[in-house]
Amino acid sequence: MPRSALPLPPSFWRALQIYMLTTVGCALLYSVLYRESFAQDLVYAAFVVAITQSLIVSGRYFIAQLLAQRSPQREPGHLRLAQNWPGWRWMLPWMIVSVVIGYFVGVRIGDLLLGVRYMPITIAHDARMVTMSLSVALVPAGFLTYVFYARNRMAEIELRAETAQRTAAESQLKLLESQLEPHMLFNTLANLRVLIGHDPQRAQGMLDHLIAFLRATLAASRAGSQPLSTEFARIADYLALMQIRMGPRLKIQLELPDELASCEVPPLLLQPLVENAIRHGLEPKVSGGRVVVSAQREAAQLVLTVRDTGVGLDAEAQHGARFGLQQVRERLATLYGEAGTLALRPALNDEDGTLAVVTLPYSRSHAQ
């Protein structure tokens, strides 16, 4: 069975459209100005425009990369150079050079192809005509260069916006961490103080979980991503602390398949969802309930769920904004766009409760 050809990228079709429009425009302009055959001028224009466009594009990349190597990352101009635009200071002289080279080389190729022994658009040694032809050729070359400038300007703006969104998301993550840590620490230390006098063994276990939780939190705050097993281990320590505090009212169930343990996920992704389940789902319920954290793969997506058997979604909504959910949504949108989502809905089972579902692209750890 023959393999289907890979589709050409949109940038190729855009470049082809620009080339065809510029070629036809030049041929029409020269045939009108010099009253020559449109078909003949179309042949010349095809080679002149192709060579000129290739020189402008390759020169733009080469000059930008050369300047980028000499520009420190911290300088504002590095962002522009990273988008392969060296600036008009360099592109304007290079555009003129490209037009001159493209004109004479393209004309020579056209002469050989058509069997013509003189240069097109009257006589080659007529300096006035050659100068006029080059001046006319500068118009489409200037248009072509401006198109590249406009496209890279838009790419630069999009990159700056993306960088700003990522920075804002990381700032929100730091804020979220600052919200999580004091709330958990104060309650844990208060319970630890009581347990030391009444049950030293449980107090020691609680202290071990607290140390592991804080160590994992510190490591997560310094990492851009982490294995899913690390996230689950951190959640296990957190839930163990909550279980010591809530006693038999809190039941824990963690479901992480071995084949998904090395998946890369953003750090502290599940923490707000688990804390939301406890604070707004189980703590208001006298009998408590169960928290189930699970992971599964669906095609190219990783699906993480946090389910509680608490008071339910409607009752939770009466308590105001749920903790950290908006930050999770914004982080997913910033990191994965439309591929990263968070859905919150009632759990479809006999125990009621709430189900939080996180969907993001499946990515395996490079260390594996």
Image (cartoon, helix red, strand yellow):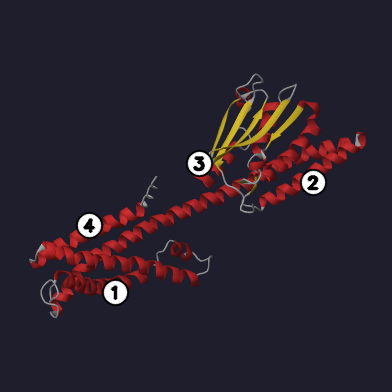
Hey, which residue is sitting farthest top in the picture? 350
Please tell me whether mark 4 sits on a helix, a strand or a loop. helix
- Labels 2 and 1: the sequence-earlier one: 1
Q: Which of marks 3 and 2 is nearer the N terminus?
A: 2
Distance (Cα) linking label 4 and label 3: 37 Å
The three-letter amino acid code for the residue at tag 4 is Leu
| Coordinates of residue 346 in the picture (x, y in percent) | 59, 24
Q: Earlier in the sequence, mark 2 or mark 4?
A: 4
Question: Amino acid type of disc 3?
Answer: Ala
User: Which residue is at the front of the view, 202 or 262?
Assistant: 262
Q: Mark 1 points at which residue?
A: 97
Q: Which of marks 2 and 4 is in front?
A: 4
Q: Mark 2 points at which residue?
A: 211
Q: Is residue 71 above or below residue 219?
A: below
The amino acid sitting under disc 1 is Val
Q: Which residue corresponds to mark 4?
A: 21
- With 146 as the anchor, is 343 left or right in this view? right
Q: What element carries label 3?
A: helix
**Quarter assignment of residue 49:** bottom left
> Can you tell which mark lies on residue 339?
3
The 10 Å Cα crowd at callout 2, few under 14, some 14 to 19, many 20 or more, is few
Q: Nearer the viewer, mark 3 or mark 2?
A: 3
Asked which secondary structure carries label 2, the reply is helix
Residue 244 in percent (x, y) is at: 81, 33
In space, the residues marked 2 and 1 are separated at their CA atoms by: 67 Å
Q: Can residue 320 be seen in this view?
A: no
Judge by depth and name the residue closer to the eye, 125 or 242: 125
Direction from residue 181 to residue 364 in the image, left or right: left
